[in-house]
Image (tube, helix red, strand yellow):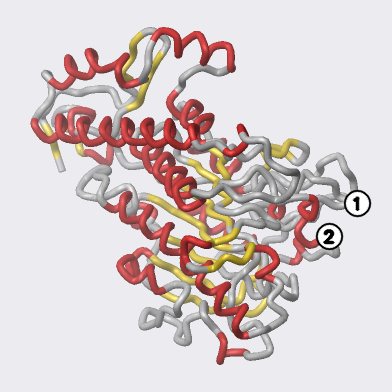
Amino acid sequence: MFVTKKHLSRRTLLRAGGAAIGLPLLNAMVPAATALAQTAAAPKPRMGFFYLPHGAIMDNTRFGAEMNRWTPEKAGRDFDLKPILEPLAPFKDHLTVVTGLGNKPAESSAVHAITPGTWLSCVPPRQSHAPYGGVTVDQMAARHIGQDTPLPSLELATEESGGSAACDGTYGCSYGNTISFRTPTTPLPMEFDPRRAFEKIFGRGRTEAERRAISRDYVSLLDMVSEEASDLKRTLGAQDRSLIDDYLDSVREIERRVELLEKRDMSKLDLPDVPIAMPDFDEHLRLMFDMIAAAYQANMTRIVSFMMAAEVSNMPYRHVGVPDAFHPLSHHAENRASMEKLVIVQRYHTQVFVDFLDKLSKMPDGDGGSVLDNSIFLYGSNMSNSNSHNNFPLPTLVVGRGGGRVKGHQHIRVPDHTPLANLHVTLLERAGVPVESVGDSTGDLSEV
């Protein structure tokens, strides 16, 4: 595609005072009479790593295939979707199910204490309370494709931590509460507070003092940039004006929901020191996904790591008819009734993820594609059977086409115990990140 419009920089920000907000990709950001693929506006891959604790109900229990609720029966393109994965049906063309992966470096008697922190590194941590593991693939990507965005990477969660079981007397707590390590000794905190996450993404002050000073001067980030946004829109075509309106409306809605969420913050109540779930976990989870979508759309970041639930989460799922706390339920003792409840929880996670994918599929990104088309997402767990606490076979999905670099629409069966790190190498390669190896990798997966 060639365009002849006036060129607007892809890095254009709406600024007012100390506030700045990025913009989605507009037609006006493509230089005149230039092929889109040859410009800085050409779609660049976005990567996301979406972690779930406690495995999945696969063919990994004493019931075998009879109780399998995850693994497709057929390999290849003509594959079925079991109950946990059924919500992904509308995005089957973007879906790659990978069966047969294991992660030996995650095997340990510490179980929950090292499971999250080894998912993206595939490096066994040292036995020490001082962290020493491996650089995670999200940070490898951030070094190469995240440096020209305001946030090279974004690390989010829905819960502050998973409790004492996410720590260990030998390994400490460094690996149980994060999936991201910038260096072998630098675990990155996962931001679980929606307000702080919003401010990190959209730049409303780096410290509490700055945020308080800013809040005295204006009520909303969008109020500050509204005049500049209006001036910009007068120079743009109808399609670009509509894109800006839609995007700013989305940010406004997130601001409103963050305000409401803060008013219902249970941390302000005098509660007993027992595991207490937020009464609106569903809203919290969806709000974090909406902020990720907005961050991708505005090109504030290309790399996101998200713990959708904490390791050893005691969150109940009453909103889907399961009042049981997540972690105790995961110790199902191979009881059918408990396992079916766990399936409901795991299917719910899939559905919320699918709602996020649907938003991305409707966001234009480049020459006729969408943000989803140009993304590469890893979705899964570093545990297999939650009752056995084992690490094979790992429930693993790849979603997105990576701008045509990922085939999609297939179920791949790799040889049993193929290192999960082989998939990590493959996804980095597909995203254009130069890498020779990750953790205990032995090669890549050419089928992906």
Q: Nearer the viewer, residue 200 or 448?
A: 200
Q: Residue at x 15, y 28 (%)?
A: 32
Q: Amino acid at mark 1?
A: Thr
The percent coordinates of residue 172 (x first, y second) are: 85, 46
Q: Secondary structure at mark 1?
A: loop
132 relative to 235, above or below: below
Q: Residue at x 57, y 90 (%)?
A: 65
Q: Residue at x 38, y 12 (%)?
A: 218
Q: Nearer the viewer, residue 192 or 421?
A: 192
Residue tagged by mark 1? 170
The percent coordinates of residue 378 (x first, y second) are: 51, 57
Q: Residues within 10 Å of mark 1 (few under 14, many from 20)?
A: some
Q: Nearer the viewer, residue 43 or 302?
A: 302
Tag on residue 33?
none
Earlier in the chain: of badge 1 and badge 2, it is: 2
- Quadrant of residue 59 within the rendered picture: bottom right
Residue 40 appears anywhere in the view: no
Real-space Cα distance between discs 1 and 2?
Answer: 8 Å
- Quadrant of residue 358 within the rendered picture: bottom left
139 relative to 100, above or below: above
The percent coordinates of residue 352 (x first, y second) are: 42, 58
320 relative to 13, above or below: below
108 sits to left or right of 14 = right
Residue 214 appears anywhere in the view: yes
Q: Amino acid at mark 2?
A: Ala
Residue tagged by mark 2? 110
> What number of labels is visible?
2
Q: Secondary structure at mark 2?
A: loop
Q: Residue at x 78, y 38 (%)?
A: 185
**Is the residue under label 2 in contact with that under label 1 (CB below 8 Å)?**
yes
The percent coordinates of residue 419 (x first, y second) are: 66, 67
Q: Residues within 10 Å of mark 2 (few under 14, many from 20)?
A: some
